[in-house]
Amino acid sequence: MNPAAQQLNQSRELSDIELLWERLGRVEQRVREAVVARRALDPDPDDPYRGQYLTPEAAARILETRDAFTPVPAYGDGVPPGAESGGRLGELAERFGLAPPDVDLLLVALAPDIDTRFERLYGYLNDDLTRRRPTVGLALELCGLPAAGSGRFRFSPSSPLVEGGLLELADTERPLLSRLLRVPDRVTAHLLGDDAIDGRLCGIVREAEQPPEPDERPGVPRAAAVLSTGSGLVHLLDRGGDPCGLAVEALRTAGRRALVVDIAALATAPEPAAIVRALATEARLGRAGVVLGPLETLAPERPEGARLLGSLCAALGSTPLIAYGKKNWDPLWTPESPVPVTVPPPGPDGMARQWRRALADAGRSVGLSAAHATADDALVEAAAAYRLDSGQLRRAATVASRLAVLGPRPVTPEDLRAAVRAQNGAGLERLARRIEPGVGWDDLVLPPATRTQLAELALRARHRETVLGQWRMRPGGGRGRGVIALFAGESGTGKTMSAEVVAAELGMELYVVDLSTVVDKYIGETEKNLERIFVEASDVNGILLFDEADAIFGKRSQVNDSRDKHANMESAYLLQRMESFDGIAVLTTNLRANLDEAFTRRLDVIAEFPMPDARQRLALWDRCLGPAIPRDATLDLEFCADRFELAGGSIRACAVTAAYLAAESGAALTMDQLVTAVLQEYRKLGRLVLESEFGPWLAKERARGGR
């Protein structure tokens, strides 16, 4: 903030406090007159026990000790210009719909929080020094309002003072006129110039930070215009965009602060009703709007969730409430229906702007230089495949910047990928096994056609927002923006490893679905388990791998009994769910013929994994043994590649077995140990051991006692 603006704010706060002091002076004058009148009517003014321990003379001395407020004429006479409508007090009266008598009643209740003299004086006027706040009857008396008429209705639950949270009535077991009045601390602090959020809302509500420059989102003007069309209840339907960020920008465009609610913390608060009232008061005090979401966390379809949402809407009244979620609004949730606004994905350009701004802000916050905090094109391209909301994106940018500070160096794609993986929730890990990729393209030995298909899968995942979102190449029918691939080939040909390589290329994690957590013998449970997996996977930047997919993606068959019927229902559910999936999924199978043909149409990429030829097997033998293991000069890998027709997984198993034998011998790896490992693998696979394959090594093995 520049010095001129800071000085302007300070002068404005000073004028607000001076105006408040001026109005409280009127309260002091009324108390002064009430004490004089009470003394005149007191039959025994010299009674030392009058007012328990405060005599009329003592009350008079209190009023004569100091003149804290400027005396002003009595109520209704000669009100200073601007006193009724200026400053924070006037703004508060306007926002809460207070009439002039309401403002005076509020000031009477506020006086003890400003000057401690009023505590003893109110105790004296209450004839009970333990009751040091004004009662309803005393407040009405001081303001000249009838206690038996309309004045008492200014303290009803639906009155602006009570319903708005500006006044609290204590001792509810007493008659109305004997109940004490109290102004909440947050209201007092606001009138004195404090704009900090109510302490009761700590951990539940935060004020959205003001960005250094406005974000030109296409939906902001529409959402801001909707806020002025009625009560301000708006529902943002999330279709892959950033509804929370859009809501904040819309409120700022409408000239309001944005209070973002942690909906999970609100739902689990010990006294949610009190939190809702405090939130409504806070929003009206600061001329703010409330951002609530995602609604799925609140679960408004349940009675307790619907009650909480309804109470919040009722408490806020005409205060803007922008709720967001991925499901359509149910009219049964609240008496009033919101204006729906769809939030589409931001597109590549919008995401690039968000990443650049988030990294620049995070770099400044962690002390990274401006040059190192700048996101270049390579960094933005590395983040193209990720789908994050505004909060996740901001947190990922902070983590990446902190990693770069350790250099110090610019933020790298590796920093960004590690930061994005840290945003993945643990919900999917309870349903699938997480694998952090540790291999790359150089570790694959595959035919060129298969590598091309894997590269196509990676580029589809990286550019799906451009093709399916910005260019709208996805047809209707509720289809999602997911990418589905099938890896088909015999066991050990590298299907799972290839999925791990694609995940590493995209900077994502691989989640392998455990069939034991999916398949259930009870009817309908398998579909429920799969639904939980798909829902969790949609919110995770990772690749979902269904290994041995033919176990759950099998062909539909003719219905002969109830088991066939429910098996077909399971396949039909999967066909529908795969189309609406928004993530990246890979299916692997050894028996492609067992998959239902309807799945083929829904697949984006089909990669065939054939058995490796002799040249590929040689590369696999050399790569699986690695450069670290010592090799004997007689080791003949070309012989192994030519004679033993093994898949990559079997070759790796042979290499590991031979390495154990070499470690036991304490010498370099020999051909004898390698052949022994191959013989063990043959026996494990149930294959015949032929002399035409092993040649002279078979006789040597038998001479050593092998079979």
Image (spheres, helix red, strand yellow):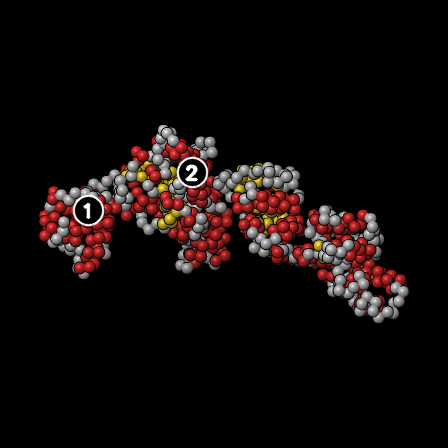
Residue 351 position, x and y percent, is 47, 44
| CA separation in Å, label 1 and label 2 | 40 Å
| Left or right: 102 in relation to 528 | right
Q: Which residue is drawn at 51% across and 40% down?
A: 326
Q: Which residue is drawn at 33% across and 38% down?
A: 550
Q: Residue at x 31, y 44 (%)?
A: 496
Look at mark 2 in the image and give the residue it sits on: 523
Indicate the amino acid at tag 1. Answer: Arg
| Residue 683 tag number | 1
Indicate the amino acid at tag 2. Answer: Ile
Residue 538 position, x and y percent, is 44, 43
* Mark 1 neighbour density, 10 Å: few (under 14) some (14–19) many (20 or more): few
| Left or right: 129 in relation to 389 | right
Q: Residue at x 55, y 41 (%)?
A: 301
Q: Nearer the viewer, mark 1 or mark 2?
A: 2
Q: Earlier in the sequence, mark 1 or mark 2?
A: 2
| Left or right: 360 in relation to 292 | left
SS at circle 1: helix
SS at circle 2: loop
The residue positioned farthest toward the front in the image shown: 561
User: Can residue 82 be seen here?
Assistant: no
Q: In which quarter of the image is the N terminus?
A: bottom right
Callout count: 2
Front-most of 420 and 650? 650
User: Can residue 680 be seen here?
Assistant: yes
